[in-house]
Image (cartoon, grey):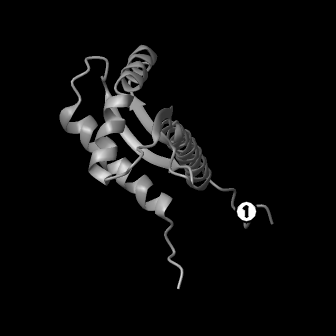
Amino acid sequence: MPSDHHRSDRVAEGIREVVATFLTEDAKDPRLVGLVTVTGVDVTRDLRQARIFVSVMGEDSAREATFAGLQSVASHVRSRVGRALRLRHAPELTFVPDESIAHAARIESLLAQVRQSESSTDSAADGSSEADESAPQPDDRSSS
């Protein structure tokens, strides 16, 4: 019976764990600044190449420096991945910026603005309807 998980999926998860552990515990490169998060890994079916999606929070200059640092430690991380996962040929690692977290934060801020404008519009509408109700109403009996 075939397995639901391909070997490349298992290797990708192993790479994600090894790289994340390296970045949090062992990375000494001073260019690796800011909050660096490994969000995912895509590995080719032949296990020769891996794209590591990384989210870096911070200013643009810090992000550029972090990706330069990641590219410089890629060969070291590659050897660690090969040893940790016991691979005969460790995949070539490429670090790719992942904008999904920043994109999600932007969407969330836009939704918060919409909610805020709706609540201020609702409160203004509630205020005008209360003012209309409190205004003296003409007496229908007096006009007859």
Q: Position of residue 134 (x, y in %)?
A: 55, 53
**Quarter holding the C terminus?**
bottom right
Q: Nearer the viewer, residue 16 or 60?
A: 16
Residue 57's quadrant in the figure?
top left
In this view of the protein, which residue sits in the foreground, 64 or 117? 64
Task: State the residue lying farthest toward the left.
Answer: 25
Residue at position x 50%, y 50% in the image: 47
From the viewer's perspective, is residue 8 above or below residue 60?
A: below
Nearest the viewer among 98 and 118 is 98
93 shown above or below 133:
above
Residue 18: x, y in percent?
30, 46
Q: At 31% from the left edge and 53% from the top edge, which residue is drawn?
A: 86
Asked whether, in this view, residue 79 is left or right of residue 115, the answer is left
The amino acid marked with disc number 1 is: Ser
Is 17 on the left-hand or right-hand side of 61? left
Residue found at the far right of this picture: 144
Task: Residue at 39%, 55% (x, y): give it.
Answer: 13
Residue 121: which quarter of the image? top right
Judging from the image, what secondary structure is the residue with disc 1 in? loop
**Horizontal and vertical percent for residue 72?**
37, 21
The residue positioned 50% from the left and 37% from the top of the image is 98
Q: Would you name the residue on which mark 1 appears?
A: 142
Q: Residue furthest top?
A: 61
- Which residue ends up furthest to the bottom in the rendered image? 1
Vertical arrangement, residue 98 with respect to residue 40, above or below: above
